[in-house]
């Protein structure tokens, strides 16, 4: 109950970084999507912490909306992943490239 | 019909200029023949106009002279004839002159000058009276103040008298009165009239005069003489060219250039101030370049044109510096302002200005050491050589010295230098001419030599004699060149007719010009031949042809100067006269006498009438121009412009006899060698092999210049081109281009299409942004 | 440190561990499970931060719906092992360097967050409850709330369209995105 808020925010930063690492370093599409969710989640933690810090509910409401958007985004993203699987038989992020460098 | 032709003077320049424009614009449509005749007709019209103007001007002169004589008689009845002017130099510019201001070129206000305190200044007040006022100089501001408290009411119009002995007048404009108490001061520089200072209502202010240069033409006796020579000889050469260039496809360009040259030369001689003269000076230089390199397909011709222009440029630079000095010393560039006040220049300027003008004249008139371009200029068509490099352009230097002789008289050392340059050049060129085998080169060196005579005359103060020689030289030298052209024409015809290839070392001297291939042309081309004889003998100075009189006048004046220096120069000039007769005789005999020495000479034929008629006319002029009646006319006319040179000492007859002796000796020697075969030229050559070779090579002046100036310059240019420009500058510019390309190539590799790479760059960007924000 | 704080710190540490597990799992299903754990721990954290409604929403939406979707997809297609090698040259070092930098800056900046009003004071009871959230949501934020509805509708339509496309394109060509 009494973790200093800046530590909570530091945790959120760490989680964000870990999520970013996943996006950058993994090739499996599903894992990448999960890493993106991690990042979103980290930001949610920051918002809630800020709400607690300033004693307003605006932060929590933002989280509410962010949650909704995340849900919609996951739905569409997974639909895309399924489409890719059906098209290519595999889903390596590196393969989804129409440009040839 | 205008009442007077004098205002039509600009038309004399305008007609040939119009010819240029017409030929350039519609010459192609007109065709070669029509263009040629049109150009000639325009110059002919200019000549007729010049003749009419001249006649009217001469009438004017008589009127003015009569009026002056009457005034003189009225004022000084006891002091007529043989007046004190025998000792004092005749004041410049006494004769009538017509100055036509066409438009104002530039106008600049300048600071004023100081007068010494106590000078009496005559002031013309509004009522017309002239009253003297004494100058009071302010303590520290160097401003003149004149106490005009006697006339407080009106603004004064100052007729200013300036000079050590009150000789010169200048005019000041005057302003309305400046309110009392206001002061106007300025730094002053001689020799402008001063500005007055307003103080307590007692003084009257005047506004500073402005420095102006007008595009103005001046017609006086000197420029009239030059005008007639340029248009007259120009007309004859135009006529001749119609025949000479009849088969040249570039005729139109040729005649356009020729007309442009005539117009430019007229600008030069008719200019009323140094700037107009300089414009003409440069233009004739440009025309010379264009015409020398006329057959520019051969790079040697183009190189000759370039050489002429560059060497001229050296002189032009000196002229330009002189121009600037004249401006700063005298404050004006107009002849009417500068020349009467020539004595006002101080020590260094008084010497520097004529010295620089001498350098300029040296370049234009091909004297030592800037003579190297004239022999090479023979690469141009022969009529061009006749017009530009014998009769007119090269005489511009002589004309310049004659025109501004008061400036030269301020520096006797420079006059001596002029004489030395002239004599040395005359001697050197005569020696070289003796060894040449190309008919045109002999004439080129002969021209240089005769110009040296004219320089000698100018240096000795015998301006009228120099101009006289200029005129006669224009006649007989143009005659000789045109005759040479006609003979070359005849030779070419002969070679063609005989189907013989042109032998001889065609690389060095084309066979048609090689005198060793000629001979016996007198019978085959009689008109050309006999006129050529007249010209050659006039050059040699045989009595009673014109050359004798003019050369004799120069010799007489030089000897009459007295003293060891001038006597030595006289001796050089006399020896050169002997040499002149030698090479003239040599040329005549080699070309016209004896048996033909090649197939070309064998089958030579006379040139068409359009070429021989000008020759005959010129021969008449060359023969008669020296006769006392005509020469006297020239003398009296020129005396109104040129300070007459008084001769004491040995009589004219003595000098005439000596000069004729030299001439006859020279001709006799030439005859003995080349006609009678009594003396073998090879033996003479063997006696002084070094001398012969050196003379034939022009005393190696060209080689010297090549080593001193040309080669280092070419090397420096080459280095600048290859290293500085190509490698450094171009390299730097190209490096920018290459750098941009390299940058592009490097950046291209980031666009992989790989999402994770893009994510990486986003990360990097985000990290940067966050860092910056955190640091705030 | 009080017991409560200790618990919160422990939860935080476990959240980090589970996140690391997500990104380093070789099998996608393992990653999904780690993810679920992370979400649950986050919900506990929300509780500690006086956001009970959000905690519930987190569990319901994230752990309940989103992760279910993930698991469905993994079950359908995620059989193969996700390789852990790195074919792209320089990606790993550069990414780690960038991440380290970013992380360093973020943590440092965040640790300097000035302590706001809430750090010392306790929030009112009912802060973050469903009632409180609802009161603010339907009064001040009703427009975004409605727009959320639209957003979800758009998402549904999008998913249906993509699924539809798949069925059509499946028979015709082998792939719409090239290699």
Image: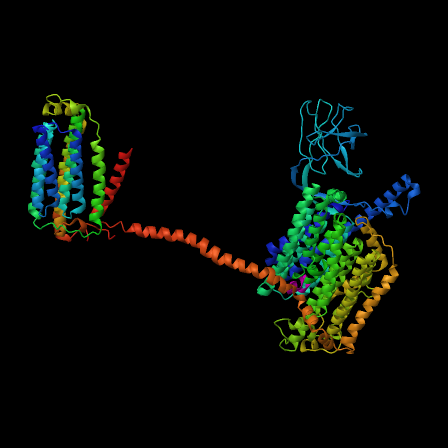
What residue appears at the point 17 percent right and 43 percent down from the top-left corner?
A21
Residue shown at the point (10%, 43%) measured from the top left? C21
Q: Toward the viewer: B354 or B38?
A: B354
- Looking at the image, which residue is at 75% across and 71% down? B586
- Where residue B653 appears, as percent x and y from the top left, is 88, 61
Does any portion of residue C161 appear in the rendered image?
Answer: no
On the image, which quarter does residue B440 sit in?
bottom right
Q: Where does residue B630 sit, x and y in percent of width and height?
A: 83, 57
Residue B76 in view of the camera: yes
Range of the magenta residues? B374-384
Asked if B179 appears above or below B717 in the picture, the reply is above
What is the tally of numbered marks visible in this picture?
Answer: 0
Magenta span includes B705: no
The prevailing secondary structure element of the residues shown in magenta is helix
Of B624 and B765, the residue lying toward us:
B765
Which residue is nearer to you in this view: B760 or B387?
A: B760
Q: Please name the colour scheme applied to the rendered image.
A: rainbow
Residue B64: x percent and y percent? 83, 44
- The image quarter containing residue B241 is bottom right
């Amino acid at each position: 109950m009494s973790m200093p808020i800046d530590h909570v925010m530091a945790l959120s930063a760490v989680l964000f970084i870990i999520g970013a690492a996943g996006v950058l370093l993994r090739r499996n599409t599903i894992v990448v999507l999960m890493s993106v969710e991690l990042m979103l989640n980290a930001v949610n933690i920051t918002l809630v912490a800020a709400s607690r810090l300033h004693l307003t509910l605006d932060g929590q409401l933002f989280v509410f909306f962010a949650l909704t958007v995340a849900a919609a985004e996951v739905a569409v993203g997974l639909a895309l992943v399924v489409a890719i699987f059906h098209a290519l038989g595999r889903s390596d992020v590196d393969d989804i490239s129409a440009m040839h460098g | 019909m205008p009442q007077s032709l004098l205002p039509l003077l600009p038309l004399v320049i305008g007609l040939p200029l119009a010819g240029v424009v017409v030929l350039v614009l519609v010459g192609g449509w007109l065709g070669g023949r029509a263009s040629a005749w049109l150009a000639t007709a325009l110059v002919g019209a200019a000549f007729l106009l010049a003749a009419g103007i001249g006649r009217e001007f001469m009438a004017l002169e008589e009127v003015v002279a009569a009026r002056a004589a009457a005034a003189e008689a009225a004022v000084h009845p006891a002091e007529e004839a043989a007046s004190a002017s025998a000792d004092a130099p005749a004041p410049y510019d006494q004769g009538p002159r017509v100055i036509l201001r066409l438009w104002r070129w530039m106008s600049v206000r300048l600071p004023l000058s100081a007068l010494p305190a106590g000078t009496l200044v005559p002031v013309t007040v509004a009522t017309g009276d002239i009253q003297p006022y004494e100058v009071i100089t302010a303590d520290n501001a160097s401003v003149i103040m004149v106490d005009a408290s006697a006339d407080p009411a009106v603004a004064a119009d100052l007729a200013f008298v300036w000079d050590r002995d009150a000789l010169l007048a200048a005019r000041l404009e005057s302003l309305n009165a400046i309110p009392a108490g206001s002061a106007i001061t300025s730094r002053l520089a001689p020799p402008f009239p001063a500005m007055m200072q307003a103080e307590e209502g007692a003084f009257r202010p005047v506004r500073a005069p402005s420095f102006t240069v007008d595009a103005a033409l001046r017609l006086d006796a000197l420029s009239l003489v030059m005008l007639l020579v340029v248009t007259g000889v120009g007309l004859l050469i135009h006529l001749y060219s119609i025949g000479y260039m009849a088969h040249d496809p570039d005729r139109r360009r040729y005649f356009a250039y020729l007309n442009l040259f005539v117009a430019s030369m007229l600008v030069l001689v008719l200019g009323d101030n140094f700037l107009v003269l300089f414009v003409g000076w440069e233009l004739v230089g440009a025309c010379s370049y264009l015409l020398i390199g006329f057959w520019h397909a051969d790079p040697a011709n183009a190189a000759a044109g370039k050489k002429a222009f560059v060497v001229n440029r050296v002189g032009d630079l000196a002229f330009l510096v002189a121009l600037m000095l004249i401006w700063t010393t005298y404050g004006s560039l107009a002849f009417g302002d500068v020349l009467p006040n020539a004595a006002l220049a101080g020590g260094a300027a008084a010497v520097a200005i004529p010295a620089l003008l001498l350098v300029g004249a040296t370049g234009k008139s091909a004297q030592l050491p800037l003579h190297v371009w004239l022999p090479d200029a023979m690469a141009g068509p022969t009529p061009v050589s006749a017009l530009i490099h014998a009769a007119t352009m090269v005489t511009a230097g002589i004309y310049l010295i004659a025109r501004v002789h008061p400036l030269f008289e301020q520096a006797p050392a420079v006059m001596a230098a002029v004489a030395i340059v002239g004599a040395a050049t005359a001697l050197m060129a005569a020696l070289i001419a003796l060894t040449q085998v190309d008919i045109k080169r002999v004439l080129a060196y002969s021209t240089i030599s005769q110009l040296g005579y004219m320089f000698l005359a100018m240096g000795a103060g015998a301006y009228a004699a120099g101009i006289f020689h200029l005129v006669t030289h224009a006649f007989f030298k143009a005659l000789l060149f045109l005759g040479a052209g006609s003979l070359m024409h005849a030779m070419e015809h002969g070679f063609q007719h005989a189907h013989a290839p042109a032998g001889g070392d065609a690389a060095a001297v084309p066979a048609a010009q090689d005198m060793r291939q000629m001979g016996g042309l007198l019978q085959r081309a009689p008109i050309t031949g006999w006129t050529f004889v007249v010209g050659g003998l006039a050059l040699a100075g045989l009595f009673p042809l014109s050359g004798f009189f003019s050369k004799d006048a120069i010799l007489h004046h030089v000897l009459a100067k007295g003293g060891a220096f001038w006597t030595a120069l006289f001796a050089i000039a006399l020896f050169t006269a002997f040499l002149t007769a030698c090479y003239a005789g040599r040329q005549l005999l080699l070309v016209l006498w004896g048996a033909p020495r090649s197939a070309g000479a064998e089958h030579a034929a006379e040139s068409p009438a359009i070429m021989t008629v000008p020759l005959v006319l010129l021969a008449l002029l060359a023969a008669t121009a020296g006769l006392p009646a005509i020469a006297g006319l020239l003398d009296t006319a020129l005396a109104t412009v040129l300070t007459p040179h008084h001769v004491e000492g040995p009589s004219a007859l003595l000098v005439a006899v000596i000069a004729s002796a030299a001439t006859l000796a020279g001709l006799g020697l030439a005859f003995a060698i080349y006609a009678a075969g009594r003396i073998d030229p090879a033996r003479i050559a063997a006696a002084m092999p070094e001398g012969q070779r050196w003379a034939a090579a022009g005393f190696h002046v060209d080689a010297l210049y090549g080593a001193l100036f040309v080669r280092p310059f070419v090397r420096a240019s080459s280095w600048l081109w290859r290293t500085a420009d190509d490698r450094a500058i171009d390299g730097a510019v190209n490096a920018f281009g290459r750098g941009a390309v390299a940058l592009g190539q490097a950046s291209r590799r980031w666009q992989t299409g790989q999402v994770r790479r893009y994510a990486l760059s986003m990360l990097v960007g985000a990290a940067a942004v966050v860092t910056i924000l955190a640091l705030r | 440190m009080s017991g409560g704080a200790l618990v919160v710190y422990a939860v935080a540490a476990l959240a980090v561990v589970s996140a690391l597990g997500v990104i380093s799992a070789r099998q996608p299903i393992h990653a999904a499970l780690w993810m679920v754990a992370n979400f649950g721990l986050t919900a506990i954290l929300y509780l500690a931060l006086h956001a009970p409604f959000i905690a519930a929403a987190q569990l319901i939406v994230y752990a309940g719906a989103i992760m279910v979707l993930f698991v469905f997809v993994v079950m359908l297609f995620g059989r193969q092992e996700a390789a852990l090698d790195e074919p792209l040259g320089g990606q790993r070092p550069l990414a780690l360097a960038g991440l380290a930098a970013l992380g360093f800056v973020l943590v440092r900046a965040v640790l300097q967050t000035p302590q706001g009003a809430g750090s010392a004071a306790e929030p009112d009871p009912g802060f973050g409850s469903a009632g409180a959230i609802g009161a603010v949501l339907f009064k001040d934020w009703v427009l975004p709330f409605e727009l959320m509805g639209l957003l979800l509708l758009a998402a549904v339509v999008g998913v249906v369209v993509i699924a539809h496309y798949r069925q059509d394109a499946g028979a015709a060509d082998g792939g719409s995105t090239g290699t």
